[in-house]
Amino acid sequence: MKEKEHKIICKSFILRSLFSVITALGFVILSYLDYIFLGIGVTFILALPLSYILSVKMFPDSSEFYSHEHKFFLRSRKGLKPDEESSPIKGHYYDDFMRG
């Protein structure tokens, strides 16, 4: 992994998180205006994970943020040795939308 790929992954992850929060707040506004009848808190609690899981389709590189390769890149950049006991898991294994 190179520094350029790291920047793309981090940018995609930040945009995915920001999109999720903005979408959840949009649902909260709809709840406040009585278009959604669940209540503001319940709507936010349900909308945030849902929008985070679905946003991987818009920002596919963000799922690599949790990958084994990206973790090793961050450790090597700090001058640390790779963790020998860690299992090599790809980023898309952490993506709930692609798994289920």
Image (cartoon, helix red, strand yellow):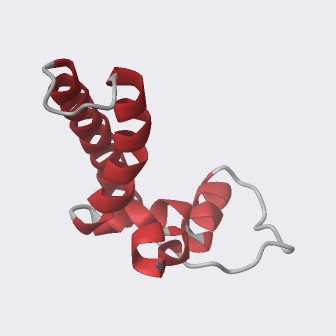
In this rendering, is residue 58 above or below 17? below
Depth check, front residue: 67 or 16: 16
65 to the left or right of 97? right
Depth check, front residue: 95 or 43: 43
Percent coordinates x, y for residue 1 in the rendering: 47, 72
Percent coordinates x, y for residue 16 in the rendering: 30, 49
Q: Residue at x 38, y 58 (%)?
A: 53
In this rendering, is residue 14 above or below 76? above
Residue 75: image quadrant is bottom right
Percent coordinates x, y for residue 99 in the rendering: 48, 79
Depth check, front residue: 49 or 64: 49
- Given the current orientation, which residue lies at the most extreme right position? 85
Percent coordinates x, y for residue 46 in the rendering: 40, 42
Residue 93: image quadrant is bottom right
In this rendering, is residue 29 above or below 71? above
Q: Residue at x 62, y 71 (%)?
A: 68
- Given the current orientation, which residue lies at the most extreme top position? 32
One can see residue 2 in this view: no
